[in-house]
Amino acid sequence: MGQDAEVGGADRDPVVCRCEAVRVRDLLMAQDAWAIDSLRQLKLLTRAGMGICQGRVCGSVLEALARAWGWDPAGALASRPPARPWTMQAALAAGKPNGGHDEER
Amino acid sequence: MTARATRVVVVGAGVIGAAITFVLSRAGVPVTLVDRGPLGGGTSSRCDGNVLVIDKDPGYQGALARLSQDLLHAWAGELGDIEYRRPGSYLALAGEDEVEPARTWVADQRREGLDFSYLDAAATHRVMPDLAADVPGSIYSPTDSTLNPLAYVAGLVAKSRHAGAETRPHTPVAAVATGGGRVAGVHLEDGSILAADVVVVAAGVWTPSLLEPLGVAVPIRPRRGHLVVSTKGPRFGDVKVMEFGYLMAKFGRERVVPADVDRYGVALVYEPTRAGNFILGSSREFVGFDTTPDPDVLRAIVRRALRFYPAMAEATVLRGFAGLRPWTPDHLPVVGWVPSVPGLLVAAGHEGDGIGLAAVTGKLVADLVLEQPPPLAMDPLAVDRFATEASQEAALWDKTRK
């Protein structure tokens, strides 16, 4: 495993993802509990990288851990639209005017 | 050879392949589950966790879904933490003109033995206080459940391994191998052969590409669907809510909706997750295998959600993504033996119900392999049910040309 100790430094169980409060231990426990063989699966099952920052803070740490565990992290943390959290009202307003029916129901 | 000595290879480690492997391995059958990517890496991790009967046609489709719900309910406790809950689900009505069709829908379902009920406006707003004030009523189905789809796959695979199944993710299958007029196993892309007496193709939207070289045509096409995920924050009720209007087509009535809602086949799906977010859906498009999220479709989903939940205007959208439903022309999956290739089974084409129908599909496929009577007729799921009409048409065409 090697690399998680370097990532963690003195803290034996550091927080990896702040938004979803996921620690290294949670990532290890998930691998014990489930059949996990990719960073994308680990992300979806522990929610690491799925919080409000969308992996901006923890992404590089997660990718380093994935490599240490023998997985290719490419694409696992791909950004998803919208690029930043938006209120639903703002998301609608940003669109082109909607043609067709005015009668909304 | 006894059925239990049959070696089985299941191609496709999505929820369908995982459920088949789970049932077979627990019955003592040696199974190898292969997938070209990670476990659950396709449609099973780009979907919601709905296990529904509320939107199924009364009759066979409803019976299939209901059976699957009971099987899942029995399994859920032993699969680990798959976030399984059974909160029931609701179909909200958008206008007074939907009241009568909705009451008919409830009556038809009750006649089939399903415990549906119709809620008038007062009852609807008591249960779902966040719904728009002009929603005139709703339908309730108490047995509908929900779970975390990828956790479901992972739980099924973990239990299968425990029962002796071999799982080989990241192992692309090049072709189904045949010999002596029957299935011999699968050719892997690395050049080796995985020998088997029975091969089950459970490859969802990718199924036709494995069957075509064998001259087997199955009309499964990718029907793209988008989902929108909110941040953690205020939720709009703990129950799953969809809209009845999308079923109006079944009553020969036109839906009156904004143009983009119509264009992308958008219908409300509201699913609160255990993590504290909520998921919004849904959309339907035939655009090939492209899963790049389309902002216009995400916007149409948001527009539709605001029609039913005006207070969501201040809620925050975190991300959107798309997956590919394995669509079939009659909206029923393809589950059964391929008549022209002994030993070859297909279990695919579950459209938007793969998560919901995985349990019953696992049971049905295991019954076929073990030569046990299935719990319900399988003719409506037959592999060659589409071929019949097409081949008859072709034969007729040949005749007229002569």
Image (cartoon, rainbow, N blue to C red):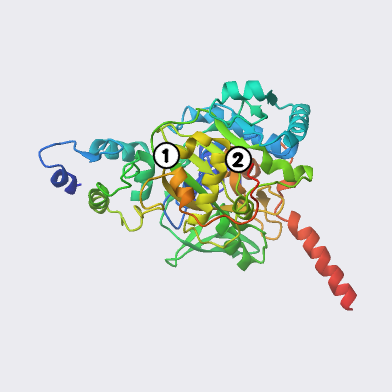
Vertical relation: B290 (above or below) B137? below
Q: Quick check: B243 left or right of B27?
A: right
Q: Real-space Cα distance between discs 2 and 1?
A: 20 Å
Residue B214 visible, this angle: yes
Q: Position of residue A85 (x, y in %)?
A: 37, 46
Disc 1 secondary structure class: helix
Q: Position of residue B99 (x, y in %)?
A: 74, 32
Amino acid under label 1? Ala
Q: Which residue was labeled with disc 2?
A: B357
Residue at left offset 42%, top offset 52%: B168
Q: Which residue was labeled with disc 1?
A: B158
Q: Position of residue B244 (x, y in %)?
A: 67, 37
* Mark 1 belongs to chain: B
Pick the residue in front: B6 or B74: B74
* Mark 2 belongs to chain: B
Residue at left offset 45%, top offset 64%: B192
Residue at left offset 56%, top offset 26%: B128
Q: Quadrant of the C terminus of chain B?
A: bottom right
Does label 2 or label 1 sit earlier along the sequence? 1
Residue at left offset 75%, top offset 33%: B105
Q: Position of residue B324 (x, y in %)?
A: 54, 54
